[in-house]
Amino acid sequence: MTATTSTKRPPLATAGRLPAYAPWAMLVGALALAYLALAVLSEPTPVAVAVLGGALFVAGSWLVSRIVEGARRSTDRLATSLVTAAFLVAVVPLLALIWLVVSRGVPMMSWEFLTSDMTGIYGDLRGGGILHAIIGTAWVTGLASLFSIPLGIFTAIYLVEYGQGRLKRAITLLVDVMTGIPSIVAGLFAFVLFTSFDPQYRSAFMGSVALAVLMTPVVVRSCEEMLRLVPNELREASYALGVPKWLTIVKVVLRTAVAGITTGVMIAIARVIGETAPLLLTVGFITTINENPFEGRMATLPVYVYRSFAQGGINMERAWAAALTLIAIVMLLNIVARLVGRYFAPKGMS
């Protein structure tokens, strides 16, 4: 019996592989080639070099990998390059925005700026601060959260645990429609609702109603998705032990989904805390502190930024510092929400 030899393709594990430094070397080469090409055709800019260099890198890395490593690995490298490029396209504008706000807002930031209002400050006079706007934002956002968070969570519980038939479909349609309502329409709704009794009425309560209209559908949608992710086996195990449905929802379903619900609530708060158009109509603006949320105009950070930017001069610096403060507040709320979600989440799921 004679041994026969056959020609087979080598297994994938023994196929050619590019060295670990190859992608970085190709990236540097692609950027250098893009710079030279743009220098010949026109003036090279960082954005143009990055875009052209990225395109050359994606095409070049795929071609080299196809020649050396084969079709499967080249396809994998192409998918990796495209996903990385999509990530950079998404994160670079965010980092640029944060850097812009921080670089322009920090010079004006001080303890005095955070603890004083604009009483007696006119034109390009130095001094003054945003304490009245911080208090107003806290009142408006807090009242809106007080209205919309319980309503949104209870609505989501009904849709997931109890709802059925036409009523469920009608509520779902209403939530979908409310999700796409422009913010100015919510402001007009609150404006007409309250000024029907008193045309001169303005208050933080009035503005919180407008923000609650925008916030509620976001809370409903996010909480509904989190409740649907809770495995049905947990509910069935609770029912098997004789636990009533309402207690199962409180002790099992909500406890399991608390981290996701908290995240959804924070997304809803971040959605409305920077709204300007509805607050221009409903809350107005003043330069002093108003501690009564149910009567009188009140300053808020978004409106403060808008008015300061429109006035120009030294107020431009105040606008950037107020915008930085607003971003810091949102980040602080997200940190607190994560801590709350981790504390209340079931053991082993935090």
Image (cartoon, grey):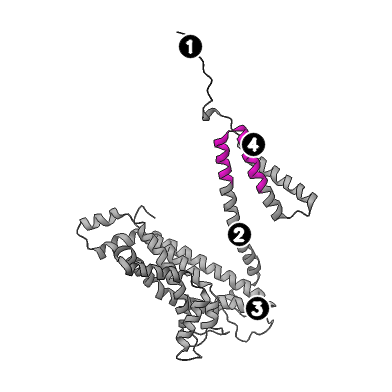
- Mark closest to the chain's N terminus, 2 or 3: 2
Q: Which residues are magenta?
A: 54-81
- Mark closest to the chain's N terminus, 1 or 3: 1
| Foreground tag (4 vs 2) | 4
| Foreground tag (2 vs 3) | 3
Would residue 75 be counted in the magenta stretch? yes
Q: Which x, y percent locates residue 321?
A: 61, 72
Asked if labels 3 and 1 touch by Cβ distance under 8 angstroms, the answer is no
Q: Which mark is residue 3?
A: 1
Mark 2 lies on residue = 95
Quadrant that contains the N terminus? top left
Q: Is residue 303 left or right of residue 315?
A: left
Q: Amino acid at mark 1?
A: Ala
**Which residue is more in the foreground, 172 or 332?**
172
Q: Quadrant of residue 80?
A: top right
**Which residue is more in the foreground, 333 or 154?**
154
- Mark closest to the chain's N terminus, 1 or 4: 1
| Foreground tag (1 vs 2) | 1
- Mark 1 and mark 3: Cα distance apart in space: 89 Å
Q: Residue at x 45, y 75 (%)?
A: 213
Q: Amino acid at mark 2?
A: Leu
- Mark 2 and mark 3: Cα distance apart in space: 25 Å
At mark 3, the secondary structure is helix
Q: With respect to residue 206, does 163 lie above or below?
A: above
Q: Main secondary structure of the magenta part?
A: helix
At mark 4, the secondary structure is helix
- Mark 4 and mark 2: Cα distance apart in space: 32 Å
Q: Which mark is residue 310?
A: 3
- Mark closest to the chain's N terminus, 4 or 3: 4
Q: Amino acid at mark 4?
A: Val
| Foreground tag (1 vs 3) | 1
Mark 4 lies on residue = 64
